[in-house]
Amino acid sequence: MVGNPDFFTGKGDEQAPEFQELESPEGELHLRFFVPSGNEFALPATGIKEVLEPSPSQITAIPNASPLLLGTLNMRGRVIWVSDLGQFLGDAIAVNTDRTEIPVIAIEDQDTMLGLAVDRIFDMDWLDIEQLQMASNVPDTMAPFLRGEWVLDQEKGKFLRLLDQVAILRSARWAT
């Protein structure tokens, strides 16, 4: 039976689904997520170090730190700052810390790492960079940290905005 070539290739329309060719993904892999205001954002997978879901008790508040920072988190012996991404981008609604876990996206550039607390993680998705448009109608507090946006539904005003993790990490806002 194993020596029978039809065992591996199937005949005609009888080919098993697991042997059918898979579609090749187009675009680049991105992590999609929401901030508390309901705005949807994406980060390139290549700029993400890790996605964590610590309990609020694992994030240690630091006195006299920027109000944008929730505190620090120990990630396998490495201490990283955790910020409220929505508030950093200018949203009025703070991330809810009164729950069992807080989604945190750890981004890194060179030796600098930062945790971005978000409302919820949506999905990993292959997105076509060539379809990226200039971001329009965005607050001045958000604009410096955007690479552009994809229009999801023009009539409903739904956009998927691509963040620039390096611009976020190097922002002077962390000094305030």
Image (cartoon, rainbow, N blue to C red):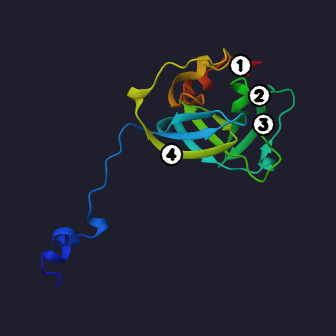
For the residues labelled 3 and 1, say whether their Cβ atoms are less than 8 Å apart: no
- C-alpha span from label 2 to label 4: 26 Å
Report whether 53 appears left or right of 160.
Answer: right
Q: In the image, what residue occupies the spot 27% across and 70% down?
A: 16
Label 2 crowd (10 A; few <14 / some 14-19 / many >=20): some
Q: Nearer the viewer, mark 1 or mark 4?
A: 4
Q: Could you tell me how many numbered marks the image carries?
A: 4
Q: Which residue is mark 4?
A: 124
Amino acid type indicated by mark 2 = Leu
The residue furthest right is: 63
For the residues labelled 2 and 1, say whether their Cβ atoms are less than 8 Å apart: yes
* Quarter of image, res 109: top right
Amino acid type indicated by mark 1 = Arg
- C-alpha span from label 2 to label 1: 9 Å
Amino acid type indicated by mark 3 = Gly
Q: Which residue is mark 3?
A: 71
Instruction: Indicate the position of residue 87 as horizontal and vertical percent values.
Output: 74, 28
Amino acid type indicated by mark 4 = Met
